[in-house]
Amino acid sequence: MDRPYMEYAFDSFSIILITIWSSVWIIHFGALFHATRRLHKRWTQPIFSSATPPSVSILKPLMGVDQNLYSNLESFFQLKYPSQFELLFCIEDKTDPAIDVVNRLIDRYPKVDAKLFVGGNTIAPIGVNPKINNMQPGYYSSKYELLLISDSRIYMKPNMLTHMVYCLIAEDGDSIGLVHQMPFTTDRNSLSGCLEQVFFGTTHARPYLFSDLIRVNCPNGMSTLMRKAVLDEAGGLVAFGRYLAEDFFIAKYFTDNGWSMRVDHQPALQNAFDDDIGQFRRRILRWAQLRQSMLPHMILLEPLGQCFFIGIAAAWSISYQFEWINPFIVFGVHVLCWFICDFILCLIIRHSISFLFIIYFIPMWLLSELLVTEAYLRAVVQPTIRWRGKRYRLRWGGLAVEVPQ
C-alpha cells in the first residue's frame, strides 16, 4: 500500500515541478519580449508638438554624500523640459554634508526653481518610514500637478523627464496614473558597479518587466512620476508613512482606484559611487525582507524564480519522469539557456555592448545568482530590517514598527 502511494506522490510532485519550471520560462520570454517592445523607444516626431505639457514637482530625498552626488543632482538642473519644473531637495539631518552640495548647485543655476528643506518631520514624525518623514516638507510645498519622486543615486539624461511625462499623459490617453522607471545603472568601473548592473539587468529585470507586461504592481520607488491629485486623495505621503515599502502601497492605491501604470521607455540610471559589495548585499536583503512581509506567499514562490534552485528541481523531475535522461545534462542545459536569456536581456536594457561587459558578465552573473539565494535564506530567518541607521520589525501586510537598537 505504501509503495504505490509514494510512487504516486513523487509522480505528481515531479509533474508539478515541471509545470512550474515551464512557467518560469514564460516569465523569461515575456520579459525579453516586453524589453524589446518597450525600452529605448525611438521617437520619429516631437513628443509634444502642440500643447504644453503639465508642470512637474521633483522631490529629491537626500542623505549623505558620495563622489557622484554632485553630478547626479546637477543632471536635474540640466533637464530639457518644455514646461516648468521645480526641484525640492529634502535633507533630514542639519549637519548632513549634502546641504552644501545642494546650495552650491542652487547658486550655480539661479534660473532653476530649486528649494532646500532641512529637518524633515523629525519633531513630529508621521510614521516609521524615514524617507516619507524626510520628504514631507517638500511635498507640502510642491505646487504642480505632476510629482516625480527620485532617489539621490539617480542620474537623469536631459530628455528623460519629457519622456516620462509623455508616457503618463499622452501615450495611452487619460488612464495612466503612474509611470515608473525600471531600475538599472550607469556603467561604473568598479566591482560593485558591475555586479549591480548585472543584477538589475537580469535577476531584477525579469520579474519587473514581466509584471509590467501583465499589469501587476511592480514599481520601485527610485524614480516614479505620478498624478499628485490622486496621491492627495489618499491623504498625501502621510497615508503611507507606516510602511517601509511606500512605493508598493502608493502604486497599489492607484490601481485600486482604477488607474493603470506603465514602465517608462528609459530605465532609471543609478549612479552612486561605491565599491562595497557588502552594502549591495544589505540592499537586496532588505528588499527580500520587504517582499516576504508584503506578500507572504513569496516565501514559497521566490526560490522557484532562481536559476540553480529551479534547475535542480527540473533536473530531478524530468529524470524521474524519463529515466533515460541524465539529470546532470538537464541541469547543464537549463543553466546555459538561462544564462543566454539573461545575457540578451541585459544587452537590451544596456542598449549597447562592450568588450568589458562581455568579460565581467559571466562572473558577475554567477555572483548575483548566489547573492540572491543568500538574501532569500537570510530574509526567512532574519525579519528585522536595518535601514538608515535604524531597526524595524516587519508585520504581515507590510506594516513596520521601529525597534530599539
Image: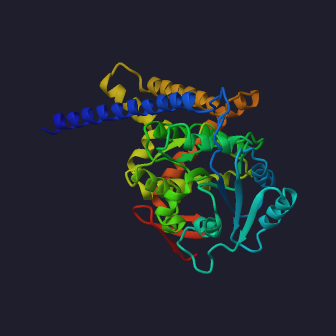
User: Taking 208 as reference, is 141 above or below it?
Assistant: below
Residue positioned 78% across, 67% down in the render:
99
User: Taking 126 as reference, is 9 above or below it?
Assistant: above
Quadrant (top left/top right/bottom left/bottom right) for the C terminus: bottom right
Spot the residue most to the top.
324
Viewer-nearest residue: 52 or 161: 52
Residue positioned 51% across, 27% down in the render:
33
Q: How many labels does the image show?
A: 0
Q: In this view, does 69 lie to the left or right of 285?
A: right
Viewer-nearest residue: 198 or 348: 348
Point out residue 382 in the picture as x, y percentages from the top left corner: 49, 62
The coloring applied to the image is rainbow
Q: In this view, does 354 lie to the left or right of 180?
A: right
Residue positioned 80% across, 51% down in the render:
71
Spot the residue most to the right.
108
Spot the residue most to the left.
1
Viewer-nearest residue: 393 or 212: 212
Q: Is residue 403 visible?
A: yes
Q: Can residue 369 be seen in this view?
A: no
Point out residue 297 in the picture as x, y percentages from the top left corner: 37, 51
Viewer-nearest residue: 277 or 357: 357
Spot the residue most to the bottom.
123
Point out residue 69 in the picture as x, y percentages from the top left corner: 77, 55
Residue 111: which quarter of the image? bottom right
User: Taking 387 as reference, is 366 above or below it?
Assistant: above
